Amino acid sequence: MKTIHGQSWNETRFCPNNPIAREYVIALFGDLAANYDLDYIQTCQYLFNAADIDQGGTCFCKHCIVEERRTGFDLEAAIPVLKTNKNAQPERDQWLAFRRSSTTKLYREISEKMKAENPTCHLRLNDVFLWGGRPAGDHGMDIKALAPYLGSLVNQDHQEQLGRKNETFTMRKRWLATNRTLIGPDMHYVCGIAPRMHASAELVRAGIKVALAHPAKVNGLALKHYDGASFSLMRAFKQGMIEAGVQGLSPTLGKRWRK
Ligand SMILES: [Zn+2]
């Protein structure tokens, strides 16, 4: 990943337009799908950063220049224009659109490779942001455009772990509604619940109730995460599901210590 001044941005991030990185990543997903009997592979990789152009926004590397030429946009010519004025149009919007299409393209190729290797394994996006209220193109990801290549989506919603008393889960409700409109009515949709240290049994139960009662139609819950989750919070998780009407769970009976 390169900034507009040609400096590397975060050595651990690859550019999806680098053919070597792309080939490696697609092969990695393909190998996992083919050989590990997985139902899905989950990623929370946002390929581009959210920084503005003059703050180190990515990417302006040589591979992006080559790739953009194919789409009819001359990034090389746009660089000096955007250096002088980061809001210059149409260069800025073309650059943002190119980031989004680059992300969609990589995930499409990953999804196609996975399907070819194992039709029962799908790609899941772990969405780490609440997109409502964020500018379109932030991080170069367009969930609506990505949706046809996803098999499921999970909101990485960790509200419970903040331990707020009388939490009404306003953000959870908005997040669930926003992403449901982006992924369409039928995609398997999972809500994160965080039974972590600052959470309380009441918050976990209330958070589950909000998720399962939401009109966005949640198909599953994700326990985020078991690190730091006490047994009492794990029991609250199960109890919350029972209270919310999830079928097939045995009642929580508690545990007695025996000598
Ligand atoms: Zn690049």
Image (cartoon, rainbow, N blue to C red):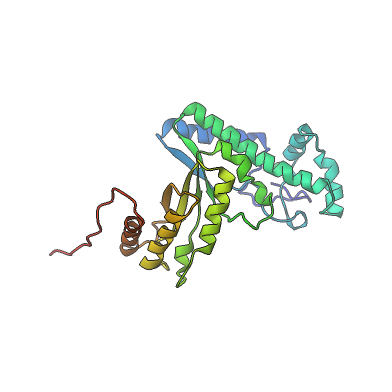
At 36% from the left and 56% from the top, the residue drawn is 244
User: In the displayed structure, would residue 238 be above or below residue 103?
Assistant: below
User: In the displayed structure, would residue 71 be above or below residue 61?
Assistant: above
Q: How many numbered callouts?
A: 0
At 85% from the left and 51% from the top, the residue drawn is 88
Q: Is residue 176 visible?
A: yes
Nearer-the-camera pick, 145 or 233: 145
Give the x, y percent position of residue 178: 58, 52
Nearer-the-camera pick, 215 or 158: 215
Left or right of 213, for residue 53? right
Identify the image quadrant of the C terminus.
bottom left
Give the x, y percent position of residue 211: 45, 56
**Residue pushed farthest left?**
259
Nearer-the-camera pick, 194 or 238: 238
At 56% from the left and 36% from the top, the residue drawn is 149
Quarter, ligand 1: top right
Q: Quadrant of residue 184?
A: top right
